[in-house]
Image (cartoon, coloured by chain):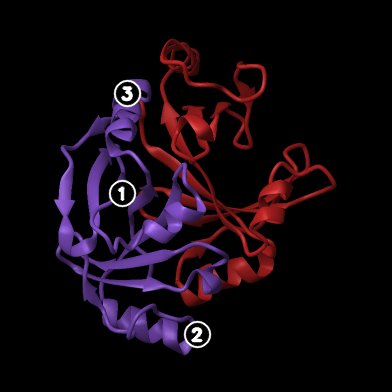
Chain colours: A red, B purple
């Protein structure tokens, strides 16, 4: 079921500083920042040859990453996103195995404009898992 | 400087349960467990088309992931490993930018038999970064 790792998301408190570190200290190619107010985040992609790291900074008053940064003010790894061919089939397989999908259990349109699901970290050993249909 | 994401490491308290979840619930290909007593971990690779997830379970009394699991008993994302062409050049670039290398600052032979460095999470927004020369 799991396809490629689409991205590894890292929450950061200061996007300008994080972008400079990945670009200058680590020598990676970074995208311009994209504000996604409907998702409550600003995003910068760190482009690696085989996948990407997605730096996330809170945007607005109700960002989905605010609670994470309250607990880990320096930032940290937030989730892993895997690609799947068929997100409804993925959801049904997860349900059959007792894994919980966050929200109402139905795919939503994610930050890349594609259907996504987030899975409960307690069912995946403390890791927040995102599935994205590609 | 940064090349491919070699692996994303996830610390888990129960390897048998984690392996079953990645294989059966998420439908991924998983390797047999490898005990690496000299590194204080047992490792299972979750093989994705473009990279791999490395599940880590403590092995022995002085595992480098024991402290992490004391703080996060359910488990969680532990580090990201990026490939580099020249680890000594990487170290020198990091030092020139003020980033701290863990340990004595020199590459060690890592769990895959190749030279590695670990970078201080405080210099990378809460993310433990491993560099591996390939």
Identify which residue is drawn at 36% across, 65% down. B130
- Residue to which mark 3 is pinned: B27
Return the mark for residue B56. Answer: 1
- Mark 2 vs mark 1, CA separation in Å: 31 Å
- Residue A19 placement (x, y as % from top left): 60, 66
Q: Quadrant of residue B128?
A: bottom left
Label 3 vs 2, first from the N-terminus? 3
Q: Is residue B80 shown to the viewer in this render?
A: no
Q: Is residue B70 left or right of residue B82?
A: right
Identify which residue is drawn at 50% across, 85% down. B97
Return the mark for residue B97. Answer: 2
Against B79, residue A84 (above or below) is above
Q: Name the front one of labels 3 and 2.
A: 3
- Residue A2 placement (x, y as % from top left): 36, 28
- Residue B36 placement (x, y as % from top left): 17, 56
Graded by Cα atoms within 10 Å as few (under 14), some (14 to 19) or many (20 or more), the crowding at tag 2 reads: few
Q: Is residue A45 shown to the viewer in this render?
A: yes
Identify the subunit bearing mark 1: B
Asked if the residues shown at circle 2 and circle 1 are in contact, with their CB atoms under 8 angstroms apart, the answer is: no
Q: Secondary structure at mark 2?
A: loop
Residue closest to the eye, B67 or A124:
B67
């Amino acid at each position: 079921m799991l396809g490629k790792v689409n991205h590894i998301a890292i929450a950061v408190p200061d996007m300008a500083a994080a972008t400079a570190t990945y670009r200058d200290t680590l020598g990676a190619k970074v995208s311009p920042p994209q504000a996604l107010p409907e998702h409550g985040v600003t995003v910068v992609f760190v482009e690696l040859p085989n996948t990407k790291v997605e730096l996330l900074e809170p945007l607005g008053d109700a960002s989905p990453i605010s609670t994470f940064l309250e607990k880990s003010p320096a930032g940290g790894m937030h989730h892993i996103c895997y690609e799947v061919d068929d997100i409804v089939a993925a959801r049904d397989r997860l349900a059959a195995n007792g894994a919980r999908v966050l929200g109402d259990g139905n795919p939503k349109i994610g930050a890349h404009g594609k259907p996504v699901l987030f899975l409960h970290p307690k069912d995946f050993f403390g890791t927040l898992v995102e599935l994205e249909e590609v």
